[in-house]
Amino acid sequence: MSGQTVSDDVLVAGVLAGDEQSFVALVERYQRSLLRLARHFVRDEALAEDVVQDTWIGLLRGVEKFEGRSAFRTWLFRILSNRAKTRAVREARYVPMDLQDGPAGADDSFDHTGTWRVPPEEWKISPERLLLSAEIRSVVDKTLAALPPGQRAVVELRDIDGLDAADVRNVLGITETNQRVLLHRGRTRLRAALASQLG
Amino acid sequence: MFMLSCRDVAASASDYINRDLTWRQRLGVRFHLLMCRFCHRYVHQMRQTVSLLGRIGRTPPSSTLDDPGGDTARDLFRSTRPR
């Protein structure tokens, strides 16, 4: 396999031209991300898999309408978001994702002057080794799973799937302020979880 | 200039990394980071966390995943082709 990654645009052009392998490559590239997002809209795993399939079918039927005004990835995620809501309402299994988040808890990291009470410690592992450790990956996975749904959704879409703020707002239907607060809180928890392992 | 506390800077860390602060806000954070090694460390660790998440996103799936997806993908593709 070539070490170079084929761009989404090239694969989309391939699908338009009737190339099956281009479509398979897109599925391999985005299946996990789509399933991850679908699970936020519907709590039933089987329904989440159906929603992702609906999304791929929607892509195949509508790919000629993709005009390239947004990134392909954004367009695909929006298809999923729409399909998920439609399907879930129809099947009466729609549990609106709790995106509002509660008030921030009391933060005792700082004293009354706003200075660190317990300063962050240096991490004992180099950044290059971070991803090589299965233990670190496990910490990240567990922490993500334990995040409130809104924080998890925003962190996954922004930091794992690489969508920008405007796209995440559109896909999840949230405000700019809400998106920034959820992202900040989710990242803060993940940093703290890593610090407990690496500090 | 309004002096930011460590709490203020930590609360702004995510916005700072995303470059979502105003010019003035960003200047306040940078000024504080120059003087406070703990906040500098905190923001650096936040960047490392975000970078790690990004690398997870770019890591290809393991071989135990998704080959059924390959067959399913081919079936889907063929089912939508005109006869």
Image: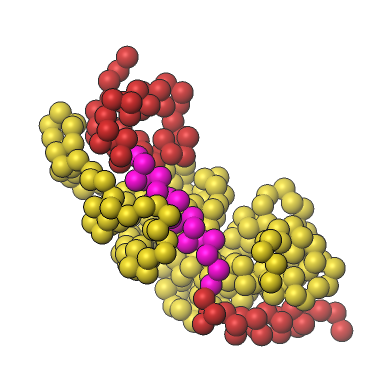
Determine the residue positioned at 18% across, 32% down. Answer: A115
- Chain A tint in image: yellow
Q: Main secondary structure of the magenta part?
A: helix
- For residue A72, say whether it is visible: yes
- For residue A87, say whether it is visible: no
Task: List x then y, in percent, for residue A21.
Answer: 75, 75
- Answer with left or right where residue A48 lies relative to residue A182: right
Q: Would you identify the image quadrant in which residue A149 lies?
A: bottom left
Picture quarter with the N terminus of chain A: bottom right
Viewer-nearest residue: A114 or B49:
B49
Q: Which chain is red?
A: B
Q: Would you identify the image quadrant in which residue B30 lies?
A: top left
Determine the residue positioned at 46% across, 70% down. Answer: A39
Determine the residue positioned at 71% across, 84% down. Answer: B75
- Answer with left or right where residue B71 lies relative to residue A174: right
- Answer with left or right where residue A116 lies relative to residue A179: left
Task: List x then y, in percent, for residue A108.
Answer: 15, 43
Residue extent of the magenta highlight: B43-61
